[in-house]
Amino acid sequence: MPKVYLHGVVGAVGSLTVLYTSAKYLPFKNDPNYLTLMKMIKEVPLISMVFLGGIPPILEEVVCRKLIFGNLKKYSKVLAYIIANIVFAVGHYNFSFQRALQHINTVPTYFVSGLVLTSTYDYDGHLLASMIAHFITNVGIPILYHLGLWV
């Protein structure tokens, strides 16, 4: 197995661990993003997997990892990690800082999940690694839910 795929799988395990732990122990039940996601997963599981596994992993990885992180890490890797993942986290609230602040208790989950995805890209050096991790994460949640393994 080429390393990029292995790194993608490892990144997905890390990201799913962050999201599962957060869903179990943080007040996600009031988070609009989580509520919309869970409603879609329950009502239209196949469509949710196609939707979640399609555009978001590609778009978010290109914007947050390749463009933002990739360009800023030349100047400061720490700052690149922070800025790329603030954008990633706020993006889950339709890029509304006001909406993100209303749900500040769940924003760190997206930030930390983004850190895992960014670390995957940074470690491997290929955007495909973080795209694979993101795809597995986004498709994995509906699968785990329907297997009775998601909170």
Image: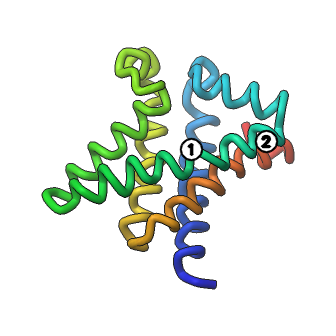
Q: Position of residue 114 (x, y in %)?
A: 44, 48
Measured in 3D between alpha carbons, the distance from the residue under mark 2 to the one under mark 1, in whole angstroms, is 19 Å
Q: Which residue is mark 1?
A: 56
The residue drawn where x is 42% and y is 73% is 124
x%, y% of residue 10?
56, 67
Residue at image mark 2: 145
Mark 1 falls on what kind of element? helix
Q: Residue at x 64, y 36 (%)?
A: 24
Q: Nearer the viewer, residue 18 or 136?
A: 136
The secondary structure type at the circle numbered 2 is helix
Mark 2 neighbour density, 10 Å: few (under 14) some (14–19) many (20 or more): some
**Which quadrant holds the C terminus?**
top right
| Residue under the point 59% across and 17% down | 30
Look at the picture and state if 88 lies above or below 102.
Answer: below
Q: Which mark is residue 38?
A: none
Q: Give the percent coordinates (x, y) of residue 146.
A: 85, 42
What amino acid type is highlighted by mark number 2? Tyr
Q: Residue furthest bottom?
A: 1
In the displayed structure image, the side of residue 16 where residue 129 appears, left or right:
left
| Quadrant including the N terminus | bottom right
Q: Nearer the viewer, residue 127 or 146?
A: 127
